[in-house]
Image: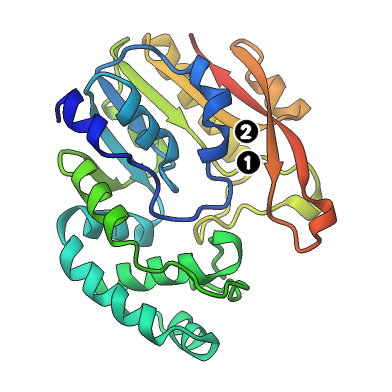
Amino acid sequence: MSTAAKEKISYRPFLKWAGGKSKLIPQYEKFFPKEFNNYYEPFLGGGAVFFHLLQTRSPFKAVLTDINADLINTYCCVRDHVEELIKLLEVHQKRHNSEYYYDLRNYHNLKGLEAAARFIYLNRTCFNGLYRVNPKGEFNVPIGKYKNPNICNIDLLYSVSEALQSIEIAERGFEAVLDYAKTSEDFVYFDPPYYPLSDTSNFTGYSRYSFSKDDQIRLRDVFAELANCGVKVMLSNSDCEFIRDIYSEFKIYRILAARAINSNGKKRGKIAEVLVTSY
């Protein structure tokens, strides 16, 4: 895609994503590499960083991955079958109400396009765009309090589909990035489930697999291995002693983020996070 073509379209996430980075991009911008040829994002989520870089950097190849099979299916359907997907979403838009939400939420056997439409519908109408599943991998977030949720944003879906046309999207664990990021021309951004600051903040159910302390250490080891190869690596996480300790050999920057996920509005506010870079 040419630079001129990118300037005509404003790309942004099509999903609401708890912990998404859209509002933090202005703080992140000065830490992103100025140039790279290949971009890898192993915890895709809402993809805010990818969409920002697509508009602000020279053209690059990208591989977007995640362990969440439903999320990856949805991205692939937006890329490959956006018109059919929009038709299904328009049906959900017309039928939306509380009863419809819970009926569809409790129906777990959809595949392909129907599963992607369900995923987007639930994402646009659930509480705070939260993704949470039970031990069986079944989505269980309650409905949000929205009067007129924008379930089918046609223009946005078409623009995202265009942005994803040449992008590889796959269901993979984060360690798979070691198979393809090898040189200083590569940039890897990790946005894992954050290390909990307390027992009550311990939400790691991003997929049916929890993200444990040992997983955080495995991720640090992957970060270090990539850095040793000269790969440019960036990571977001909680600002706490554990994270600062395991990444102490790298550059660590403090970022202020808004805490959005709390049923008590008075407990939402600014909280410190860290941005770690290998460069």
Which residue ends up furthest to the right in the rendered image? 266
Residue pictured at 25% horizontal, 30% vertical? 7
Q: Nearer the viewer, residue 97 or 75?
A: 97
Rendered image: mark on residue 237: 2
Q: Nearer the viewer, residue 166 or 194?
A: 166
Residue pictured at 58% horizontal, 46% vertical? 19
Q: Earlier in the sequence, mark 1 or mark 2?
A: 1
**x then y, percent, for residue 41:** 38, 35
Do the residues bearing badges 1 and 2 touch, measured as CB atoms within 8 Å?
Answer: yes
Tell me if 244 is positioned left or right of 157 in this view: right
Colour mapping used in the image: rainbow
Q: CA–CA distance between discs 1 and 2?
A: 5 Å
SS type, badge 2: strand
Instruction: Give the amino acid type for the residue marked by disc 2 in the picture.
Output: Asn
Residue pictured at 30% horizontal, 82% vertical? 91
**x then y, percent, for residue 277:** 53, 16
Eyeballing the image, is 233 above or below 23?
above
Instruction: Give the amino acid type for the residue marked by disc 1 in the picture.
Output: Tyr
Q: Which residue is mark 1?
A: 194
Q: Nearer the viewer, residue 238 or 21?
A: 21
